[in-house]
Amino acid sequence: ATLGDVEKCFEYQSNLHSAVNLVFGSSAGNWLVPALHTVCKATHAVAIQADESMGNTSDWVKLQSAVTLLQESFSKALNDRTEYKPNAPLDEEGSKKAGVLLIVNQLFSMYFRLNTLRLCKNLLRPVESRNLHEEGTMGQKVTYRYYVGRLNMFEDKYEEAEKNLDYALSHCYKDSLRNKKRILNYLLPVKLLRGRLPTGFLLEKYKMYEFWPLVEGIRTGNLRVFNEGLMKSQELFIR
C-alpha cells in the first residue's frame, strides 16, 4: 500500500487477522495469545483510521468488518476446551481462554462506538459465567469494569454502575490521570444521582469544573444554578 492509503492497509490487516485467527485456532496451547492481542488492537485501530479517512463515520463500514474478525478471535479463545488455570504461563499446554479479556474489551469499545450495546450481552454472559473477568492484567480488569459500568448506566442499574466504576477508578494506575478522568466522567453523574457529592478537591484535581454548578446547586438546593450548569455543559454530559 502507498503511504497514507489507509483503506488498503485495512485490507491487508484484515487478511493478516484472518490468517492469525486460523493459526491461533489450530495451534496447541496459548503461546500465541500475545500475537493475537497485537493483531486485534491493530485491526481495531486501522479500521477507525480507514473509516475516518474515507468519511465513513456515520456507518463505520470498516469498523463493522473489524468487529467480525474480533468476534471470531473471541470465539476461538473462549471455546478452547483446555482447562483454564489462572496465572499459568503461556505455553503449548495452556488454555486459550487466557486471551479472552483483552479481546472482550476491544469489542466493548467497538460496540459503544457503533451504538450496538445489545451485543455486549453476548460477551458478558460467557465471560462472567466462567469468571474470566476476574483474571488477566489489572489494566484489562479495570477496562472491563469501566465498560460494564457504562453499560449499567444505560440499563438504569445505577447501584451496579457505581460499584463497577468505583472499582475501575480505585484500581486504575495511579499516574494515569487521563484514564481516571474518563472514568469520572461517568462515575460522577451516577454518584450525583445517588446523592453522593464529590469533594471540591477531586473536581479541582481532575479539572472537572463543569460539575461545580451541579454540585453547588444540589448542596444549596438552588435549582437555577443546577439547571444553568446543566444547560451550559449539556453537550459534554450527553456525550
Image (cartoon, grey):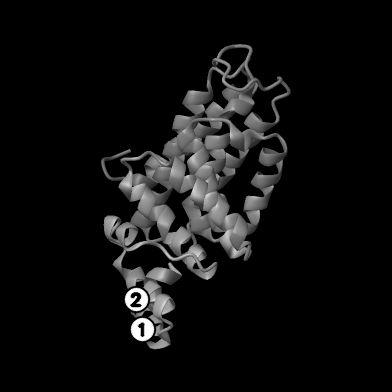
Q: Earlier in the sequence, mark 1 or mark 2?
A: 2
* Badge 1 amino acid: Val
Is any atom of residue 189 visible in this view? yes
Q: Quadrant of residue 144?
A: top right
Q: Residue furthest bottom?
A: 224
The answer to whether 49 is drawn above or below residue 99 in the figure is below
Which quadrant, please, contains the N terminus?
top left
Q: Which residue is at 61% across, 59% downward? A: 159
Query: 132 and 116: which one is in front?
Result: 132
Distance between the alpha carbons at the discs numbered 1 and 2: 6 Å
Picture mark count: 2
Image location (x, y in percent) of residue 36: 51, 28
- Circles 1, 2 touching at the beta carbon (< 8 Å): yes
The answer to whether 6 is drawn above or below residue 29 in the figure is below
Q: Quadrant of residue 182?
A: bottom left
Query: Could you say which disc has been placed on residue 213 in the image?
Result: 2
The answer to whether 115 is drawn above or below residue 66 in the figure is below
Q: Which residue is at 33% across, 57% downward? A: 202
Query: 91 and 143: which one is in front?
Result: 143
Q: How packed is label 1: few (under 14 Cα within 10 Å), some, or many (20 or more)?
A: some
Image location (x, y in percent) of residue 151: 58, 57
* Badge 2 amino acid: Pro
Image location (x, y in percent) of residue 193: 52, 69
Q: Which residue is mark 1?
A: 225
Q: Is residue 219 left or right of residue 177?
A: right
Which quadrant, please, contains the C terminus?
bottom left
Image location (x, y in percent) of residue 235: 38, 73
Q: Which residue is at 62% across, 24% downward? A: 96
Determine whether the residue tagged by mark 2 lies in a helix, strand or loop.
helix
Determine whether the residue tagged by mark 1 lies in a helix, strand or loop.
helix
Is any atom of residue 69 visible in this view? no
